[in-house]
Amino acid sequence: MISPGLSAALSDWLDHLRALGGAAEATCTAYRADVAGWLAFQQAHRGGPMGAATVVATPTRDMRAWMAAERAGGLSARSLARKLSAVKTFVRWLAERDGGDPTAVLSVRAPKFHRKLPRPLAEDAAAAVLDTVAEQAEGWVAARDRAVVTLLYGCGLRISEALSLTGADVPLPQVLRITGKGGKERLVPVLPLAREAVETYRRACPHPLPAEGALFRGVRGGPLSPRAVQRAMEGARALLGLPATATPHAMRHSFATHLMTAGGDLRAIQELLGHSALATTQAYTAVDAAHLMEVYDRAHPKA
């Protein structure tokens, strides 16, 4: 448990992130758990409650003690780096609000880790998925599943973004305005294939699709859940013999990688995906390079 004063400060910080940064609720929930865990450790480590000034001035040795305890508990370097980022953001905000020198906390280096490369599908496999997800269901449900997965691959949408579309969005325009992570808006071109798939679903859907309601519906008429899309992908994966990495999000990875392979501009792909940092998009250049090396190893006589 942390002191009431620090608990209130943590809540104020999260409110600040929501109001000014547009942080998603899931992000705020994760940040609360990360920072509350750090505060609880520091209080136990120092043997009593702490005030804001003490928190801001947390020395390097106490930061290292916390990181060592997290690693000893089995936390991965990647997850610890995420927690440390949340702690630094909180301490920086607390120092700006209440004063103090946060240098010791902010200077702590995150543990090194290897970023996982995206795992896209081959172009023929991605095309086969679009047909196979529809073959597992009948009638309007088959049309619905195909429409959702087509948006993931044809427009590079996240599953949450596809399921956030409403009845007001149909018929889909040639360019769709999407609100992604952190409330960031972007414009996404919509392929004729995707517009046709969504229109086929709209005509077949037996449930009303009012402008303010969800576009994609479950069997009983409620908003379609992400789990239903995941199940459709799982079935397609089994029928096609694809690896476990062939998830709905892999269709978004495939969208980006196939654009990159075809010579797409990195900055343009960043905008299409809604990435805040170019470094995130640059992971797809590594995927493309890895694919080229595989081709080289298979085909070059001296490889």
Image (spheres, rainbow, N blue to C red):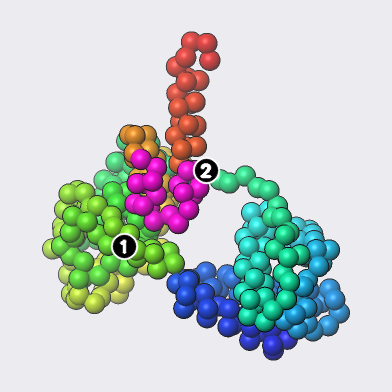
Q: Which type of secondary structure does the marked residue at label 1 adopt?
A: strand
> 42 left or right of 143?
right
Q: Residue at x 58, y 78 (%)?
A: 13
Q: Position of residue 169 (x, y in %)?
A: 21, 66
> 157 left or right of 49?
left
- Residue beneath label 1, please? 178
> 193 left or right of 18?
left
Quick check: is 281 in the magenta stretch?
yes
Please identify, in this view, whether the residue under mark 1 or under mark 2 is nearer the observer.
1
Q: CA distance from mark 1 to mark 2?
A: 25 Å
Q: Residue at x 67, y 82 (%)?
A: 98
Q: Which type of secondary structure does the marked residue at label 2 adopt?
A: loop
Q: Nearer the viewer, residue 105 or 232?
A: 105
Q: Residue at x 63, y 80 (%)?
A: 97
Q: Amino acid at mark 2?
A: Leu
> 8 left or right of 146?
right
Residue 240 drawn above or below residue 85: above
Picture mark count: 2
Of callouts 1 and 2, the N-terminal one? 2
Does the CB distance between marks 1 and 2 fall below 8 Å? no
Q: Nearer the viewer, residue 15 or 119?
A: 15
Tell which residue pokes out farthest to the bottom in this image.
Answer: 4
Q: Residue at x 80, y 63 (%)?
A: 60
Dot 1, crowdedness within 10 Å: few (<14), some or many (≥20)?
A: some
Q: Which mark is residue 117?
A: 2
Highlighted magenta segment, given as a residue range: 265-283
For the question of whether residue 58 can be seen, the reply is: yes
Residue 235 drawn above or below residue 203: above
Q: Amino acid at mark 1?
A: Ile
Q: Position of residue 111 (x, y in %)?
A: 70, 52
Q: Quarter-wise, where is residue 175 in the image?
A: bottom left
